Image (tube, helix red, strand yellow):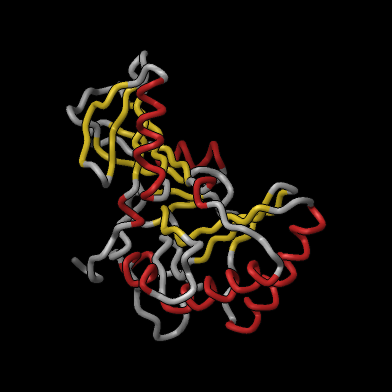
């Protein structure tokens, strides 16, 4: 799944000077962030809009509050809605400025009469299991045009495509690498996703509910449903 936010080697230029990592719990305890959920790679919110023009007006308001705090979010604009993500390090770790920005964005949404819909939020990643002693990351980054991040990950430099996480195949089988899909969703959505997948013919292969579930499709493809980023509450270095 996503890399450990305690890895100090993954600090990004986006991190405000002197900032410390904020846990998901501390973020959720901050005022004015009820619209937001902590998934892989940051805090996210989705706001429904009636048209592209309405979405564009909201983006203008987001730009104004981002300039006021000196911290720019990632924004995806569609006629149906606007998705906003804020983070302070390239591994998605948060700091206090993310909570500040999130509250200001939510206030602008309320002023424009926009409603948040957390059920629409998700972050998809690809987990690549590889044989011991084999490093397939150069192949994947070359094929996708991705950048290395830390020791185990690769990301789209424009942060659009799914991230890649590389880990050891267990049990190790030479020449038989595997992949599965990681899906990070809000904690209140996770069990609904699991139930829907089971109703569609899947099965639970492993579980640490309510934090994560490993599901298998009818033909044994793997999908992890991850709610743990929205619960996370450990100190840097733990």
Considering the image in quadrants, where does the C terminus appear? bottom left
Q: Residue at x 42, y 38 (%)?
A: 126
Compared to 83, does 225 lie above or below?
above
Residue in the foreground of this view, choosing between 232 and 164: 232
Q: Residue furthest right?
A: 53
Q: Position of residue 233 (x, y in %)?
A: 26, 65
Q: Position of residue 155 (x, y in %)?
A: 48, 50
Q: Position of residue 26 (x, y in %)?
A: 33, 72
Left or right: 122 as drawn, with respect to 226: right
Considering the image in quadrants, where does the N terminus appear? top left
Q: Residue at x 21, y 31 (%)?
A: 206
Compared to 14, does 147 lie above or below?
above
Q: Residue furthest top?
A: 219
Left or right: 103 as drawn, with respect to 231: right
Q: How many marks?
A: 0
Left or right: 142 as drawn, with respect to 47: left
Residue in the foreground of this view, choosing between 148 and 55: 55
Q: Residue furthest front?
A: 113
Q: Residue at x 54, y 61 (%)?
A: 85
Q: Position of residue 113 (x, y in %)?
A: 69, 64
Q: Residue at x 34, y 27 (%)?
A: 222
Left or right: 203 as drawn, with respect to 67: left
Compared to 90, does 130 lie above or below?
above
Residue in the foreground of this view, choosing between 211 and 223: 211
Q: Which quadrant holds residue 28?
A: bottom left
Q: Which quadrant holds residue 67?
A: bottom right
Q: Which quadrant holds residue 209?
A: top left
């Amino acid at each position: 799944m996503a890399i450990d936010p305690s890895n100090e080697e993954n600090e990004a230029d986006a991190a405000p000077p002197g900032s410390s990592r904020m846990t998901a719990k501390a973020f959720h305890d901050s005022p004015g962030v009820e619209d937001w959920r902590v998934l892989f790679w940051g805090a996210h919110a989705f706001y429904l809009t009636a048209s592209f023009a309405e979405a564009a007006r909201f983006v203008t308001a987001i730009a104004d509050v981002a300039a006021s705090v000196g911290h720019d979010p990632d924004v995806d604009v569609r006629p149906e809605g606007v998705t906003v993500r804020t983070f302070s390090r390239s591994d998605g770790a948060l700091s206090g400025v993310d909570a500040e920005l999130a509250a200001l964005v939510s206030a602008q949404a309320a002023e424009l009469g926009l409603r948040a819909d957390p059920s629409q939020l998700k972050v998809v990643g690809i987990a690549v299991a590889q044989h011991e002693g084999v490093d397939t990351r150069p192949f994947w980054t070359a094929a996708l045009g991705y950048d290395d991040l830390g020791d185990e990950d690769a990301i789209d430099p424009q942060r659009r495509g799914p991230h890649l996480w590389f880990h050891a195949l267990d049990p190790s089988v030479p020449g038989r690498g595997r992949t599965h899909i990681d899906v990070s969703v809000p904690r209140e959505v996770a069990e609904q996703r699991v139930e829907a997948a089971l109703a569609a013919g899947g099965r639970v292969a492993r579980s640490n509910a309510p934090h994560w579930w490993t599901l298998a499709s009818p033909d044994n493809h793997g999908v992890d449903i991850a709610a743990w980023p929205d619960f996370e509450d450990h100190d840097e270095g733990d």
